[in-house]
Amino acid sequence: MAGVQLLLRRLPLRLGWLAYAPYGPLVDWADAGQVRALREAVDHAARQHGAALLKIEPGFGLEHVDFAAYGFRPSPQTVQPPRTIRLDLAADEETILARMNQGTRRNIRKSEKYEVEVRQGTREDVASFNALLAETGSRAEFGVHAPEYYRLAYDLFVPRGWAALLLGSYAGQDLAGVMVFRLGRDAWYLYGASSERERQRMASYGVQWAGVRWARAQGAARYDLYGVPDAAPETLEAQFETRGDGLWGVYRFKRGWGGEVVRSVGAWDRVYNRLVYTAYRLAVSRSE
């Protein structure tokens, strides 16, 4: 059995559409017949919708796959951050804490000492989370989705037990929140936000630790902190104290949790219209 989710995005200048498979396709890459059958179906669907190219980001642990043999070429542009940090949740909590750096452990304890109360949020609490996201996005100058996006994420995943909204508060004020997802043995921290109020209480650490504990209680063996700069580990360690652009600002926070830096196989393109693809690559190179 194999499958894929295709998303369509319009290319600029009415050049057609880009078809995108996030973390897919789901296929047995060792079964060449299955891969080709799925690729033919994807090609047909993408061309029906006027796609000039197909972009796939298959994910992790596929370094052995020869994507070029299936008609793909390395892409100059990724959509998902190709590099991330994963925590091993198979150990007990004391071992997980021991793997963290001293500052992270200290800040987790501060959040407890300074009376940050962490709760699992209800649907009504999504409004508070959206307010924290808006404040964080404005402060850190990064984009957030529309409020409806997070309400829909809550409705789709939390009631099924596949996600949790965790909020940390003090004296009735929500100071930080995370939305954590889990499927099978994997968990992901995808969305987080915090307020400038009462920052000395380290609420961000309290809710993140609650997210780790929630994922572990759900049976997850890995906790993905989702997204760090796409640089080798030695470069990350050499530059994180001096850089704040892009994902460098969050790397300082995420590195302290004691995980392993891993990289996906990145993005790969399958070209349907060579002229449009040439223009696409030129546009990508000029935006860098």
Image: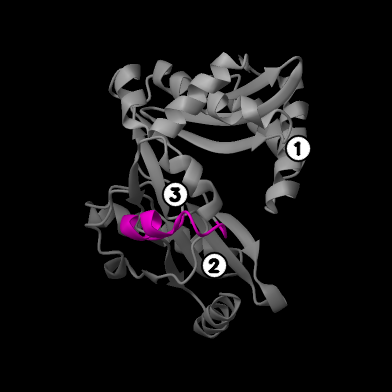
As drawn, 221 above or below 47? above
* x, y percent for residue 261: 34, 47
Magenta range is: 229-246
Query: Which of pointers 2 and 1 indicates the residue nearer the eye?
Result: 1
Q: Determine if residue 136 is in view.
A: yes
* x, y percent for residue 185: 36, 28
Q: CA distance from mark 2 to mark 1?
A: 31 Å
Secondary-structure class at tag 2: helix
Count of number-bearing discs = 3
Q: Provide the residue designation for mark 1.
A: 148
The residue that appears at 57% across and 21% down in the rendered structure is: 111
Which of the marked residues, 2 or 1, is nearer the chain's N terminus? 2
Say which amino acid is labelled 1: Glu
As drawn, 113 above or below 23? above
Q: Where is the C terminus found, in terms of image quarters?
A: bottom right
Magenta part, dominant SS? loop
Q: Assess whether mark 2 and mark 3 are in contact (beta carbons under 8 angstroms).
A: no
Which of the marked residues, 3 or 2, is nearer the chain's N terminus? 3
Specify the color scheme: one colour
The stretch drawn in magenta includes residue 238: yes
Q: Assess whether mark 1 and mark 2 are in contact (beta carbons under 8 angstroms).
A: no
Q: Where is the N terminus found, in terms of image quarters?
A: top left
Query: Which of the two residues, 9 or 142, is positioned nearer the viewer here?
Result: 142
Q: Provide the residue designation for mark 2.
A: 47
The stretch drawn in magenta includes residue 124: no
Secondary-structure class at tag 1: helix
As drawn, 194 above or below 27? above
- Identify the mark at residue 23; answer none if there is no mark: 3
Residue neighbourhood size for the residue with mark 3, other residues' Cα within 10 Å, grouped as few (<14), some (14–19), many (≥20): some
The residue that appears at 48% across and 46% down in the rendered structure is: 252
